[in-house]
């Protein structure tokens, strides 16, 4: 029995020692117990340690309850903040986020998205309809007065339409990327693009004042955004060519890469003749999918005149920038004639005949005076073109004329005279 009593006592000590690991800053006092006395009764008689233990347990319990209450309060706070955030979003309030401010889609201000793609396009359509009405009023005023005030009003409206165009096309492009394959949104986008094209055509008519008053070659084409649907198309194809020269005025500050000023595709070969600057690569010319890197530096936001000549014999090429020879090479698609019956597109790179555009390869900037010859121009002829000498010749394969080119998707034509509007 004595051994059993001491065993129980040791077990009691072990239990108390293990419990002490759960209660910080708690002391336990060991007390001898007679072998004939009940352990529970002995513990009750010695009230000091028991009271300390009870107090500690109550303190711990109170701490736990306080922490539980704090957690519940925090959950309630989070719930309230979430509710307020939802109300702010529904009202279009600017909500602070990490790294800046986010405009939520409820408020319809200039350049902001409304509640949904369909609503957004409908609102943009209404805005364009308003601009269209204002333009009609301006046309009527111009016909009745023909005054300086009419021209001033026209210029103001043109600036307004230009700003609206960039916002509309940017928004529609974003919506299409976020909602691919939705036919209704695509149809509405096409209608918006058609309205924009019509507006700019009518502005061009106002600029002319009367039909034919502006020379057909005194214009530029502007591609304000990097999209997969904004482009210009040459109405006629190219003939078979064993040599060529092409020249154009170009202005861009796009980065990285200005994109694709033009591409010519034929059946079976999408890269028959392409001028492209894509990503961080230098500008390149592709002939029958063969590549030569060009020494051009043009993405400084200034007008530059560039020309490239090529002959099929040995594939010899020359590159001129601003009338100066910048580089030469050979073995570029030697003995391969440029094939006829293709599609010539400005502003986009074709992956298929007349289509397959990729927004990342689209040209952003302005083009003018794009001419093509079926022979190699001399250095003197190219210098005359770059300096706007009156002896400069137009291309005998393609001459720069409004009647030869159609624009689509928001690309626009503006009055431009080389060497008078430079930089």
Image (cartoon, helix red, strand yellow):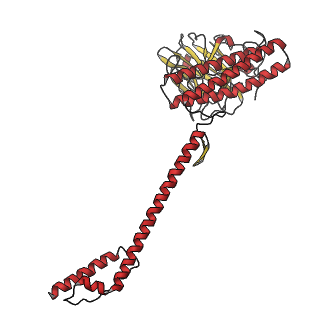
Question: Would you say residue 408 is visible in this rendering?
Answer: no
Examine the image and state in which quarter residue 261 appears.
Answer: top right
- In the image, 185 versus 79, the foreground residue is 79
Examine the image and state in which quarter residue 260 appears.
Answer: top right
Q: Image point 49% across, 57% down: which residue?
A: 74
Residue 284 x %, y %: 57, 27
- In the image, 396 versus 159, the foreground residue is 159
Residue 100 vs 13, above or below: the answer is: above
Residue 232 x %, y %: 61, 18
Q: Image point 16% across, 88% down: which residue?
A: 2
Q: Which image quadrant: the N terminus? A: bottom left
9 left or right of 257?
left
8 left or right of 123?
left
- In the image, 80 versus 357, the foreground residue is 80
Q: How many marks?
A: 0
Residue 220 x %, y %: 70, 20
Q: Seen from this angle, which residue lies furthest left? A: 1
Q: Which image quadrant: the C terminus? A: top right
Residue 291 x %, y %: 53, 26
- In the image, 403 versus 138, the foreground residue is 138
Question: Would you say residue 411 is visible in this rendering?
Answer: yes
131 left or right of 194?
right
Q: Image point 25% across, 84% down: which residue?
A: 41
């Amino acid at each position: 029995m004595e051994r059993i009593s001491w065993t129980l006592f040791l077990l009691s000590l072990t239990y108390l020692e293990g419990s002490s690991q759960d209660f910080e800053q708690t002391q336990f006092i060991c007390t001898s117990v007679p072998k004939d006395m009940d352990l529970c009764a002995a513990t009750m008689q010695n009230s000091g340690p028991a009271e300390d233990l009870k107090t500690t347990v109550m303190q711990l319990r109170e701490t736990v309850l306080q922490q539980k209450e704090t957690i519940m309060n925090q959950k309630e706070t989070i719930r309230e903040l979430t509710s307020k955030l939802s109300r702010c979003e529904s009202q279009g309030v600017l909500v602070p986020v990490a790294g800046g401010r986010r405009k939520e889609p409820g408020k319809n201000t200039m350049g902001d998205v409304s509640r949904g793609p369909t609503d957004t396009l409908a609102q943009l359509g209404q805005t364009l309809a308003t601009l269209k009405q204002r333009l009609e009023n301006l046309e009527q005023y111009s016909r009745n007065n023909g005054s300086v005030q009419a021209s001033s009003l026209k210029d103001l409206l043109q600036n307004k339409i230009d700003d609206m165009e960039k916002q509309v096309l940017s928004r529609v492009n974003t919506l299409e990327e976020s909602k691919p394959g939705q036919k209704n949104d695509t149809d509405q986008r096409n209608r918006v693009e058609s309205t924009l094209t019509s507006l700019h055509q009518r502005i061009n008519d106002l600029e002319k004042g009367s039909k034919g008053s502006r020379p057909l070659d005194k214009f530029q084409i502007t591609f304000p955004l990097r999209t997969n649907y904004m482009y210009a198309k040459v109405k006629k194809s190219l003939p078979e060519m064993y040599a060529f020269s092409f020249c154009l005025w170009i202005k861009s500050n796009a980065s990285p890469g200005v994109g694709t000023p033009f591409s010519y595709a034929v059946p079976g070969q999408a890269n028959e003749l392409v001028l492209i600057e894509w990503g961080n690569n230098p500008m390149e010319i592709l002939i029958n999918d063969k590549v030569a890197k060009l020494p051009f530096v043009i993405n400084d936001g200034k007008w530059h005149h560039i020309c490239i000549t090529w002959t099929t014999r040995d594939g010899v090429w020359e590159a001129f920038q601003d009338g100066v020879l910048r580089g030469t090479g050979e073995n570029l698609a030697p003995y391969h004639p440029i094939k006829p019956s293709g599609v010539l597109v400005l502003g986009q790179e074709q992956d298929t005949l007349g289509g397959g555009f990729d927004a990342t390869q689209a040209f952003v900037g302005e083009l003018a005076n794009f001419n093509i010859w079926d022979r190699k121009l001399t250095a003197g002829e190219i210098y005359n073109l770059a300096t706007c000498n009156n002896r400069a010749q137009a291309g005998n394969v393609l001459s720069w004329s409004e009647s030869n080119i159609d624009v689509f998707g928001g690309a626009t034509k503006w009055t431009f005279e080389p060497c008078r509007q430079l930089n």
